[in-house]
Amino acid sequence: MRFVKRIYLLRTIGLGVGFFCVAAAFVQQPVAWPLWALLVFHGYLWPQVARAWALASRIPYRAERRNLVIDAAFGGFWIAAMQGNLVPSAVILSMLSMDNIAAGGLRLFMRGLYASIAACALGWWLLDAHWSPQSDLPTILACLPMMALYPLALGKSTYEMSKKLAERSRQFEVVSQMDGLTHLFNRRYWESLLIEEFSQRRKAPGAQQKESFLLLLDLDHFKRINDTHGHLVGDEVLRNFAQLLRIHLRKEDLIGRYGGEEFVVILRNIAHADALHLSQRLVERARASQDGVNKLYGCTVSAGLVPFTSDMEAHFVWLQRADHAMYCAKANGRDRLVVWEATLVRNAEPATVC
Ligand SMILES: Nc1nc2c(ncn2[C@@H]2O[C@H](COP(=O)(O)OP(=O)(O)OP(=O)(O)O)[C@@H](O)[C@H]2O)c(=O)[nH]1
């Protein structure tokens, strides 16, 4: 529909001023009234007819491409009717080509060209035309508005469209990075941020004064929320917890939903004591959010915190350590923070201390 609207505007301008090119050639070499009538129809009625026809069809975009080929055929016919009057013929051909290549690339351009050649040959034969390429001064002058106005209109319309496309693709990019429920970063995108942070830290370990931490948070007994209150409330808890993270973390922290009821945060460029304090505060805030607007329906959170250390060979080691620390928090009774350290040994018995 938008394509039809765009072409309608361009066609109205193009044919409105193009009328004068052909009309001037008809004055230079007089023609019979049916050709004048056809010219008036093409110049001022055809844009309306083409739009209505395209909009009434099942696939307006395809119908409009067909209309563009008809435009090209009209162009070819006018060249024959003007007996090859050189300046208006060249202007019409170049404007039509520009139109078709802009609207449908080389393929539409070639289809338009064939249609122009066929209609020109048919017109030449029907009208028994004679090659008469001279253009007098009034004809040349009548072509000037077309040469000046139409490329401007087409350029403006193409610019507007590419601006819209750039905006759309930016929106798509943002949407593709987000988790639909919580509007935090989704796992795929967040993991790419983790890889980036990891490689920056590996490349230049001393570049930042402070450290980077990975924090993994998992809601406790979340299944119970779903089982007791239903999935809609479960979703609400996930959204509320995401909001809690947004409120209490810093703007440089990269927060993602890792999956289900698991959340991950990269705490960038932060002192050890601050990372610890921030993470501990999140656990306490979750515990305190049992009612109020952002309530968690009794859910607490278990968290694992891991500093970046240069002995990690890959980003997933960082993740594994965070998972390990979080698992220890669960195993130690949940609702707590565990900071990873090398002595932390995963125990086979979930109930025992890590
Ligand atoms: N409402 C809702 N539930 C989800 C979503 N994603 C995962 N879940 C549920 O989250 C629950 C996770 O359950 P478990 O893995 O047993 O974890 P838990 O109950 O939190 O237990 P612990 O982690 O051991 O404390 C499952 O019931 C999933 O169906 C979601 O997007 N919305």
Image (cartoon, grey):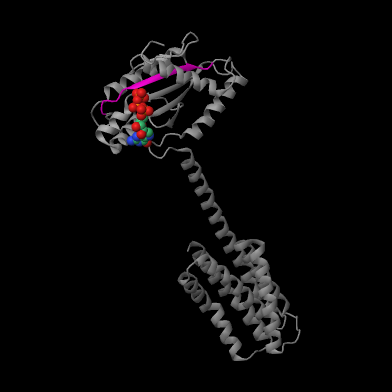
Q: In the rendered image of this protein, does residue 38 appear above or below residue 47?
A: below
Let me know if residue 33 is in the magenta part. Answer: no
Tell me residue 228's x, y (percent): 25, 32
Question: In the rendered image, is residue 242 in sight?
Answer: no
Taking 61 as reference, is 132 left or right?
Answer: right
Tell me residue 49's x, y (percent): 49, 76
Looking at the rendering, the quadrant in which ligand 1 lies is top left
Tell me residue 35's x, y (percent): 61, 87
Q: Which of the two residues, 82 or 258, is positioned nearer the viewer here?
A: 258
* Stretch of the chain drawn in magenta: 297-308
Quarter of the image that includes the C terminus: top left
Q: Which of the two residues, 224 or 283, is positioned nearer the viewer here?
A: 224
Taking 242 as reference, is 134 left or right?
Answer: right
> Which residue is most to the bottom?
32
Q: In the rendered image of this protein, does residue 171 appear above or below residue 339?
A: below
* Count of numbered circles in the view: 0
